[in-house]
């Protein structure tokens, strides 16, 4: 899909972003990279819409016990990377590796970029919850798109 198509689909989902924001999110690892046809035309994969929708909601704020919490870019990127690394139709509770392995991977992904979320190590419960919220937002975007 071309950038304008992605932006238009996101607008239908209630996410109003510019072409520059889409480009920045690609550079920051919040959406899949575009491929280029004829070395000029950027083409994004279809899952870009759901991942942009989920990233938007984590960046702009999610409700935690009545408080709106905005996650930093580095944390959203790490959450997306782990989500993408999992088989697409598996739920967080069905992962076949230990939570310790998960936390180690999550912390490594964040630390290798020099971003320390919230100034502390993530707890197992909090990091798992972020992945579940991301997964729920991807599912929500898919459901809304089938209604178009």
Image (spheres, rainbow, N blue to C red):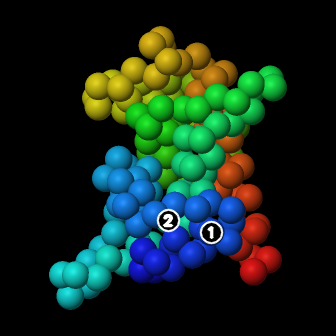
Which of pointers 1 and 2 lies earlier in the amino acid sequence?
Answer: 1
**Could you tell me which residue is drawn at 74 percent across and 33 percent down?**
63
**On the image, numbered disc 1 is attached to which residue?**
11
Q: Secondary structure at mark 2?
A: helix
Q: Position of residue 136 (x, y in %)?
A: 71, 49
Residue 90 is at least partly visible in this image: no
Mark 1 surroundings: few (<14), some (14-19) or many (≥20) residues within 10 A = few
- Whether 59 is drawn above or below 102: the answer is below
> Pointer 1 and pointer 2: residues touching (CB < 8 Å)?
no
Q: Position of residue 121 (x, y in %)?
A: 48, 14
Q: Is residue 31 left or right of residue 129?
A: left
**Could you tell me which residue is drawn at 42 percent across and 57 percent down?**
21
The numbered disc on residue 48 is 2
**Could you tell me which residue is drawn at 35 percent across and 26 percent down?**
115
Q: Secondary structure at mark 1?
A: helix
Q: Quadrant of residue 113?
A: top left
């Amino acid at each position: 899909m071309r950038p304008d198509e992605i932006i238009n689909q996101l607008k239908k989902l209630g996410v109003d972003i510019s072409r520059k924001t889409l480009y920045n999110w690609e550079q920051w690892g919040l959406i899949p990279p575009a491929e280029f046809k004829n070395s000029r035309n950027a083409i994004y994969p279809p899952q870009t819409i759901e991942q942009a929708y989920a990233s938007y909601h984590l960046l702009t704020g999610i409700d935690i016990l009545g408080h709106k919490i905005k996650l930093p870019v580095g944390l959203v990127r790490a959450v997306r990377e782990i989500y993408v690394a999992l088989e697409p139709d598996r739920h967080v509770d069905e992962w076949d590796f230990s939570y310790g392995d998960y936390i180690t991977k999550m912390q490594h992904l964040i630390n290798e970029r020099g971003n320390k979320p919230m100034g502390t190590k993530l707890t197992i419960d909090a990091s798992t919850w972020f992945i579940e919220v991301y997964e729920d937002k991807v599912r929500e975007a898919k459901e809304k798109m089938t209604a178009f």
